[in-house]
Image (cartoon, rainbow, N blue to C red):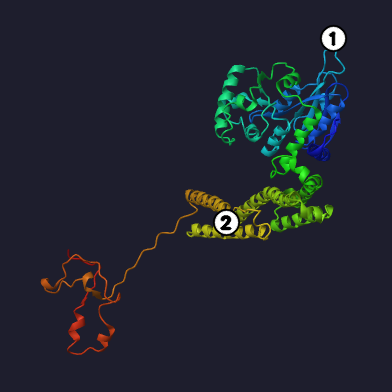
Amino acid sequence: MRVLSGVWSSGVVLLLALSSWDGYDCVCEGNGLVSGSTSRLPMSLSSVINDLEAEGATQISAATFLSSRGVTRASRASILKNLFRDASGGEGDESLTDGVTTAFGMKLFEDAHNEVDEESDKKGVAIANPAVDASVTEVAATVHACGGSVVYLVSQQDLQRGEGLFDKLGPAVEDLLRSDVKSGRGLVVVVEGDDDIETAKSKLEAAAANMLLNLVQKDAPHPRANTLSDVFGGNIKYISSATAIDLDDTLCRLTQLKEPSVAQSTVASAVYQSVNSGYTSVDALQKSPYDLAAVRKLLPVSRAALKSCISTVEEKGANDNLITDFGELCDAAVKRSMEQFDNTFSSPTLMKKSSVARRIRKELVQEMYAELDDLFQAQMNFLHQASFESFLRDLNKLRISPALKTDMQRVASKIVKEYQNASRRMCNSKQSSPHLDPRLQARSAQLKREMADFVNERLQTAKATGKYVPAPRKGITVGMHWLLPKPFGNDYRQEPWKVHTMDDLVYTPKDKLTDVNPQDILNVDENTLADWTKYVVPAPTGSEMLYLK
């Protein structure tokens, strides 16, 4: 292997350290499939490139194998092995397992009947195979590590619907358009099945044109990419998955061949940018050796701490157990894992001088709570189920009576309050509250709606069977004083001109109570007796009241 200098040497040191992360590497004897790795992408490409160089490859082509949403796992695994089968006739392809093998290397064969110059370049192909559920960030970094070359398996169903084509490829293309490297990219589109390639090509190009309109690209004077040819420099080839083709040789002709040292540098750049997005290139590694040391030391430790935290909480919640103090459990697990993280990595100088180290520690806590939030939502579902079961038990204790509806509604209100209190207790810690979201308002509304629907259904069933008869509505009794205010009653025993005949039955006394001043009644004498009596009129008793209009 050629020894790198300067910043690229630092980048390769980073890759050599990261390539030893969790996973295994296998080297198969003979030609064909010479290397496979299950380590995390894009770091696993480093070990594959090293193995290809050890097998004598001096020119390496790299590509990322992606698929559209409609491709099934079984179809993807079968087509992957068919496209990159071991031509040596050995059993090398047994180590190529989709969903497990994240990267593998293929060594190209020379024709046995042709004499090959020993000094001529020997070619190899490094293929990155992200998992179907890999994150968009991981896929974009992997495509960048492969120099922008992609082998894209597209489903006929996705082409027909125009959906699910660019879930992972779209963000990767956007990342490529923002990068400074323009040459050497290649795209091999593998159409699932043996349908018309030209029809599939036109559909994919049309969908890609709409996708590119919505991507963030560099501003002028940089030209805007409007087609896939603009993105990949015209290096595009369409093939059918049912067609036997030497895809390894096709990639070597379609993409840019690189020396192993240059290929390692490209992977190192992608790894560092995925870890530390604050830097735009690997040049910062030379300026900040503390950041490089932080990446090499902290990332494996952070993954171990994350795994320990999640496993601790999962053990407590095994067998679908409801944990009423789940928030406190999460805080305790995070605190314990962070203490292990700090004890394993006891270098205050590096933590003080490296912004990357501080960022890794901060993002580790956020990642822990992000992973725990999924478990927390599962606990909220258990609480929802337990509350509804408690609601059913309380309903069974009610006696069927005319007030059954009111009793059932009262039970539902009590269960909602208990559910809200239990939800707050599950995430009542100050540390976990910003991270664990109970979505209390939405979940409470859902529980209310379910209980209301159940109450209405039970009441309708009881009415239909005759077991429940609603209570009749109570009548209203109205009583009036015999001294009725004059606009509301008339004494028809008086003379007609003294009877109130105006249709203004809306009457409001001056003091809101009565027009008769209580003090005037107490101070009544012969002179003032007639002053207040004119405001009231005796109302004769009867079963009805007559109003003259």
Mark closest to the chain's N terminus, 2 or 1: 1
Which quarter of the rendered picture does the C terminus lie within?
bottom left
Spatial CA span between label 2 and label 1: 86 Å
Secondary structure under tag 1 reads loop
Total marks shown come to 2
Residue at x 82%, y 15% (from the top left corner): 110
Q: Please identify the residue farthest to the top as the structure is shown.
A: 113
Q: Pick the residue in front: 79 or 252.
A: 252
Which one is in front, 503 or 64?
64
Q: Circle 1 sits on which residue? A: 113
Note whether 382 is above or below 477 in the view shown: above
Q: Secondary structure at mark 2?
A: helix
Left-right relation of 465 to 420: left
x, y percentage for residue 48?
81, 30
- Quadrant showing the N terminus: top right
Q: Is residue 133 visible?
A: no
Q: Position of residue 417 (x, y in %)?
A: 58, 60
Q: Is residue 547 above or below residue 53?
A: below
Label 2: how many residues lie within 10 Å, few (<14), some (14-19) or many (20+)?
Answer: some
Q: Is residue 533 above or below residue 242?
A: below
Residue type marked 2: Leu
- Image point 71% across, 59% down: which residue? 328
Give 93 or 457, whichever is nearer the viewer: 93
Kindly identify the amino acid type of the residue bearing the numbered disc 1. His
Q: Is residue 66 left or right of residue 157?
A: right
- Is there CB contact under 8 Å for labels 2 and 1? no
- Whether residue 533 is visible: yes
Say which mark, if any, is on residue 459. Answer: none
Residue beneath disc 2: 395
Q: Indicate the position of residue 462 as horizontal and vertical percent values.
A: 50, 51
Determine which quarter of the picture holds residue 99.
top right
